[in-house]
Image (cartoon, rainbow, N blue to C red):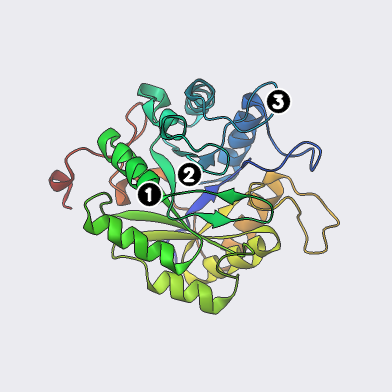
């Protein structure tokens, strides 16, 4: 399918937890740098943004709602309709109270979505621990707060676990999935694995492909050609080229995505359209998921 029937979701991931200024000067770390990179991305064209917050002093990842509040309120001054997801990662923080703290924000600082990784995973040098009770508590908290889970699946088993959570009443369609391929201990970045994961998604699911490291560009390209969305940014890859001769800027990656999308006749999906498809509130001061799902035809 081609645009306008199938516009392209661009999920922008500017920062992540790992890139440092020592690795690349281009990664935004301070709240003001993150906000400015999101501002540039909005001007280029994105559908949503996946935000990791960093400590002002150390540059290390932080769970503090006060830092997320500064970022979200600043972004919404220039992009009041933009869909914003906050990270609830288990790579650094294990206590439920810490991981769930950004979900307590309200008003103009309330996130529309919160990341929910659907199992524990091993990265190159570190594990991200997501025990079943933690996943279910975070899902229940987001359901209570009317925040949509941004479902993260690194292999097909995680998709099956999402179906299990849906059967338990902890998740409700429509869903949004990031399918992340290429991590060394998870699904590898090839067409067969991508196809299996897409096939196994529950009904009424929207999806974006992400590639870890050198897999980012191939998986983004496959997603654009196949009619899916993309997750793109320095969180997943700091290099612009496969030979690693040029460090990327977030703007470089976004311009390339738009070039590829134009070649495939895929227009950008607006935040407003994705809000409607995911039953999110309309933005402009009203954020999160609509409370009465039945009233909106689901």
Residue at (21%, 37%) from the top-left corner?
291
> How far is mark 1 from mark 2, CA to CA?
9 Å
Task: State the residue position of label 1.
Answer: 274
Q: Badge 2, how many Cα within 10 Å: few under 14, some, many 20+? A: many
Q: Are marks 1 and 2 in contact (CB under 8 Å)?
A: yes
Element carrying mark 1? helix
Picture coordinates of residue 224, whole percent (x, y): 54, 66
Callout 2: helix, strand or loop? Answer: strand
Q: Which mark is residue 48?
A: 2
Quarter holding residue 219: bottom right
The residue positioned 38% from the left and 59% from the top of the image is: 206
Q: CA distance from mark 3 to mark 1?
A: 35 Å
Secondary element at image label 3: loop
Looking at the image, residue 177 lies above or below residue 249: below
Q: What quarter of the picture does the N terminus occupy?
A: bottom left
* Side of 58 relative to 292 (left or right): right
Residue position for label 3: 58
Give how far across and how far down residue 46 sits, in percent: 53, 46
246 vs 293, left or right, is right
1 or 2: tag closer to the N-terminus? 2
Closer to the eye: label 3 or 2: 3
Q: Quadrant of residue 167?
A: bottom left
Neighbour tally class for label 3: few under 14, some 14-19, many 20 plus, Cα within 10 Å:
few
> How many angstroms separate mark 3 from mark 2 (CA)?
27 Å
**166 lies above or below 188:** above
Residue 288 or residue 297, whichever sits in front: 288
Q: Residues within 10 Å of mark 1 (few under 14, many from 20)?
A: many
């Amino acid at each position: 399918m081609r645009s306008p029937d199938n516009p392209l979701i661009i999920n922008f991931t500017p920062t992540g937890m790992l890139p440092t200024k020592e690795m690349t000067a281009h990664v935004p770390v301070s709240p003001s740098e993150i906000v400015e990179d999101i501002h540039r991305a909005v001007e280029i064209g994105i559908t949503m943004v996946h935000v990791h917050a960093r400590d002002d002093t150390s540059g290390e990842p932080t769970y503090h709602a006060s830092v997320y509040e500064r970022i979200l309120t600043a972004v919404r001054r220039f992009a009041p309709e933009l869909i914003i997801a906050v990270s609830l990662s288990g790579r650094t923080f294990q206590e439920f109270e810490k991981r769930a703290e950004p979900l307590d924000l309200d008003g103009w600082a309330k996130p529309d979505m919160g990341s929910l990784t659907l199992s524990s995973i091993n990265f190159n040098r570190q594990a991200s621990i997501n025990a079943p009770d933690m996943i279910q508590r975070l899902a229940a908290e987001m359901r209570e707060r009317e925040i949509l889970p941004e479902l993260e699946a690194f292999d097909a088993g995680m998709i099956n676990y999402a179906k299990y959570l849906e059967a338990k009443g902890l998740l409700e369609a429509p869903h949004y999935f990031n399918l992340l391929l290429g991590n060394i201990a998870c699904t590898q970045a090839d067409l067969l694995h991508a196809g299996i994961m897409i096939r196994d998604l529950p009904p009424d699911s929207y999806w974006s492909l992400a590639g870890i490291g050198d897999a980012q560009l191939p998986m983004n390209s496959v997603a654009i050609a196949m009619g899916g969305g993309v997750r793109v940014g320095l969180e997943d890859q700091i290099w612009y080229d496969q030979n690693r001769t040029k460090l990327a800027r977030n703007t470089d990656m976004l311009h390339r995505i738009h070039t590829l999308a134009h070649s495939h006749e895929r227009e950008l999906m607006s935040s407003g359209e994705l809000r409607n498809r995911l039953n999110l509130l309309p933005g402009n001061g009203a954020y999160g998921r609509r409370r009465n799902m039945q009233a909106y035809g689901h």
